[in-house]
Amino acid sequence: MSRLITVSLDKRGVSCTARMLDDAAPRTCAAVWDALPLSAPVFHGKYARNEIYTLLPEFAPADPGRENTTVTPIPGDLCWFSFDSDQLGNPAYGYENSTGTGTTGAIVDLALFYGRNNLLINGDQGWVPGNVFGAVIEGLDEMAEACQDLWMGGVRGETLSFQRAT
């Protein structure tokens, strides 16, 4: 039986349901599942295009490493990225120290891609492959509309949450 998670934009009251891709990304799925629920401020992708994400302090006992990676996520993909604080320290990214940049330790980026034509390349880092650990199976259209509102209206005060579906 598939494990399901709910991904939500809390202030906007919008959520979607995703199926965990346990067969393709077992280590990443285990790391996320075991840490749920997770919630933090949301950001909208600056380089990747149709992406929202949150930055969290390292929460798994071990980084899952690369599995089921992509640099061209499709609508509905949930991805895991691992960074160290120095990789996100460029002020062009717009992060404040409260997000974890400028500190020691790893930062986990959990992302939802809501539209087509995404390309995971960064001017400072080059290609940034992500582990695809989930696929949205319900509610993507409503979530995409809310994500577009984040892009046009701003993300301040909004959180992105991941929890086990009930």
Image: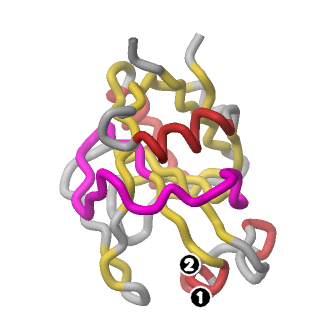
Q: Magenta-highlighted stretch: main secondary structure?
A: loop
**Distance from label 2 to label 1 (Cα)?**
6 Å
Classify 96 as above or below 8.
below
* Residue 99 vertical position relative to residue 111 in the rendered view, above or below: below
Three-letter code for the amino acid on which mark 1 is drawn: Asn
Task: Determine the secondary structure under disc 2.
Answer: helix
Q: Crowding at label 1, few (<14), some or many (≥20) Cα neighbours within 10 Å?
A: few
Q: Which residue is mark 2?
A: 93
Q: Residue at coordinates 37% horizontally, 37% vertically from top-left?
A: 144
Camera sees residue 148: no
> Which one is in front, 137 or 155?
137
Tell me how the rendering is colored: secondary structure
Asked which secondary structure carries label 1, the reply is loop
User: Quick one: quadrant of the N terminus?
Assistant: top left
Label disc, if present, on residue 90 of the rendered structure:
1
Identify the residue shown where x is 53% and y is 25%: 6
Q: Are marks 2 and 1 in contact (CB under 8 Å)?
A: yes
The range drawn in magenta is 57-79
Residue 81 image point, x, y percent: 48, 61
At a point 80% along the width and 68% down the height, the residue shown is 98
Displayed quadrant of residue 20: top left
* Horizontal relation, residue 32 to residue 47: left or right: right
